[in-house]
Image (spheres, helix red, strand yellow):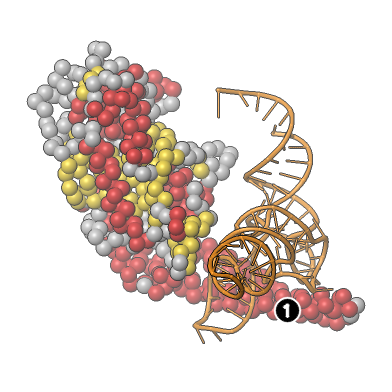
RNA sequence: GGAGAGGUAUCGAAGUGGUCAUAACGAGGCGGUCUUGAAAACCGUUUGCCUUCACGGGCACAUGGGUUCGAAUCCCAUCCUCUCCGCCA
């Protein structure tokens, strides 16, 4: 969400940003919201002066009453009543205008970083850098669920009966591997100076609307029936929400946190053939990292964050690449975003395993996360990035560490979390 | 889930319809006096948001409504905290 003052002063820039994001249909909203804002300020000024008048007279009434001058007091009461109708009309206008302005402002996207490539949709995202050699072995790599089944590691049939499509049972070594990856990722981030945190897995609606746009909310969030609670889609939601309505002392920045949570997503929309198995699911677990920092530092933190994910995957011998989201694929709140993609030797292409985003001050403005600095108060910048989301990462892990004999190598860094094993042997 | 108490600034806390709500009183923070330095003492200062070129004005006492000329104060609803009981990993 932008500052209305910024929109007022830079309408052409806001419109150009909409063009860059291929949201031309929202361009008229810019002039509309500026007009509503002007009307709102006029109404506010008149209402304020009426309120000022009322306050003054009410004080006089108080003084007269205490002196016992009832008749004079009654006269003054009439004066206030005369203005009451106009004031209540203005107050109604103020409320309506404010609501309209807010609802429009919530749909106007954040200004993207100048470095973001212009493109219509995800097909125009831009590869940035590859890390590691994308190897294609000389034996066939099975579909990930088939690999898991050789270890008796997955039961999708039962999950379907119990919870429906989009859920899974992970079992045995595969489940252990899942937990090992989470534990390793947690320690990996702690070693890099991040503070580990386990947040609430449900959040209130005001936090939901603070951390994401309405479009995302509708497509992602599960609501608890009869309560003002939503299951989190990622721990970013409750981790950023943690700072709602706070004024942070500048000296305590940056906040660098890593959090664990299960994540729940409706995943409205198309499910392709490559999204079977544990690729796109309603429930998964994720280790996340978030940063709250000064505006001038967010660019630097952005680069540090995605680098962490690259390093983590490389430490498990999985080739990855970074992919920059183009303007049209960038969510409305985001200033800049990189996906980290892992190599799939089966598909012979990279696929998304993490997403790193700089939100600028958009979440901070919605949630009122401010910083008390030497030169006054300002909104913080917020960033988030996936450390690792094991169900999906297991696809990359199994495909890249599979041997011709069906066994799976455990990289050195994971062995302490797997009971010292250096290899998993299939039972089928 | 039941019963009770409570929610006022950085913290503690007073105020129970107007005339001490920017908010008493105490503590903390900041600046100063004193001191070789520190402590103590003393003096001053210390909420946020909106609006205005400015002067100024408005709003906020958990949140949202209501009553009133006027609400921290009275009424209704909701949220949260604490204590006790119940239930529970």
Q: Quadrant of residue B13?
A: bottom right
Answer with left or right where residue B62 lies relative to residue A250. Answer: right
Q: Which of A413 and A337 is in front in this view?
A: A413
Q: Can residue A187 be seen in this view?
A: yes
- Residue furthest left in the image: A138
Q: Is residue A146 visible?
A: no
**What's the chain of the residue with tag 1?**
A
Label count reads 1
Say left or right for A380 vs A389: right
Mark 1, Cα crowd under 10 Å, few <14 / some 14-19 / many 20+, is: few
* Residue topped by disc 1: A56
| On-image quarter of the N terminus of chain A | bottom left
Helix, strand or loop for disc 1: helix
Q: Residue at x 41, y 70 (%)?
A: A6
Furthest toward the right, the residue is A68
The quadrant of the picture occupied by the C terminus of chain A is: top left
Location of residue A398 with respect to A295 vertically, above or below: above
Residue A352: x %, y % from top left:
26, 40
What residue lies at 29% left-to-right and 49% top-to-bottom? A304
* Residue at 24% in and 42% down: A310
Give the answer, above or below, for where B1 lies relative to A241. above
Residue A125 rendering spot, x and y as whole percentages? 22, 50
The spot of residue A338 in percent (x, y) is: 27, 49
Question: In the figure, is residue A293 to the left or right of A44?
Answer: left
Residue at x 72%, y 76% (from the top left corner): A54
Residue A385 coordinates in the image, percent (x, y) = 34, 45
Lateral position of residue A278 relative to residue B66, left or right: left
């Amino acid at each position: 969400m932008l500052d209305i003052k910024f929109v007022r002063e830079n309408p052409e820039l806001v419109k150009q940003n909409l063009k860059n994001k291929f949201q031309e249909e929202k361009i008229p909203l810019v002039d509309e919201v500026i007009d509503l804002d002007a009307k709102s300020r006029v109404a506010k000024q008149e209402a304020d002066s009426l309120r000022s008048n009322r306050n003054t007279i009410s004080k006089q009434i108080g003084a007269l009453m205490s002196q016992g001058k009832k008749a004079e007091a009654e006269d003054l009461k009439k004066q206030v009543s005369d203005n009451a109708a106009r004031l209540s009309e203005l107050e109604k206008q103020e409320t309506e205008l404010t609501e309209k302005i807010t609802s429009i402002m919530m749909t106007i996207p954040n200004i993207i970083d100048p470095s973001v490539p212009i493109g219509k949709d995800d097909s125009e995202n831009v590869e940035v850098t590859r890390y590691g050699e994308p190897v294609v072995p000389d034996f066939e790599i099975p579909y990930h669920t088939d690999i898991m089944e050789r270890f008796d590691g997955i039961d999708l049939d039962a999950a379907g009966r119990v919870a429906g499509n989009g859920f899974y049972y992970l079992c045995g070594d595969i489940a252990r591997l899942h937990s090992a990856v989470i534990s390793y990722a947690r320690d990996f981030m702690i070693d890099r100076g991040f503070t580990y945190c386990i947040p609430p897995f449900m959040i209130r609606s005001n936090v939901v609307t603070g951390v994401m746009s309405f479009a995302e909310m509708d497509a992602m969030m599960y609501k608890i029936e009869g309560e003002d609670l939503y299951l989190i889609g990622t721990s970013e939601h409750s981790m950023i929400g943690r700072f709602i309505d706070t004024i942070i002392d500048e000296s305590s920045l940056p906040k660098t946190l890593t959090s664990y949570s299960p994540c729940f997503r409706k995943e409205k929309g198309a499910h392709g053939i490559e999204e079977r198995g544990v690729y796109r699911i309603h429930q998964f677990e994720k280790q996340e990292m978030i940063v709250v920092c000064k505006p001038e530092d967010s660019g630097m933190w952005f680069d540090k964050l995605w680098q962490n994910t690259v390093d983590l995957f490389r430490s498990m011998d999985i080739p990855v690449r970074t992919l920059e989201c183009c303007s049209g694929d960038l969510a409305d709140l985001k200033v800049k975003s990189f996906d980290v993609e892992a190599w799939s030797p089966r598909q012979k292409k990279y696929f998304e395993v993490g997403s790193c985003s700089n939100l600028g001050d958009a979440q901070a403005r919605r949630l009122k996360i401010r910083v008390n600095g030497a030169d006054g108060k300002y909104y913080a910048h917020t960033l988030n990035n996936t450390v690792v989301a094991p169900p999906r990462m297991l696809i990359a892990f199994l495909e890249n560490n599979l041997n011709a004999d069906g066994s799976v190598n455990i990289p050195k860094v994971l062995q302490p979390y797997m009971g010292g094993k250096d290899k998993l042997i299939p039972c089928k």
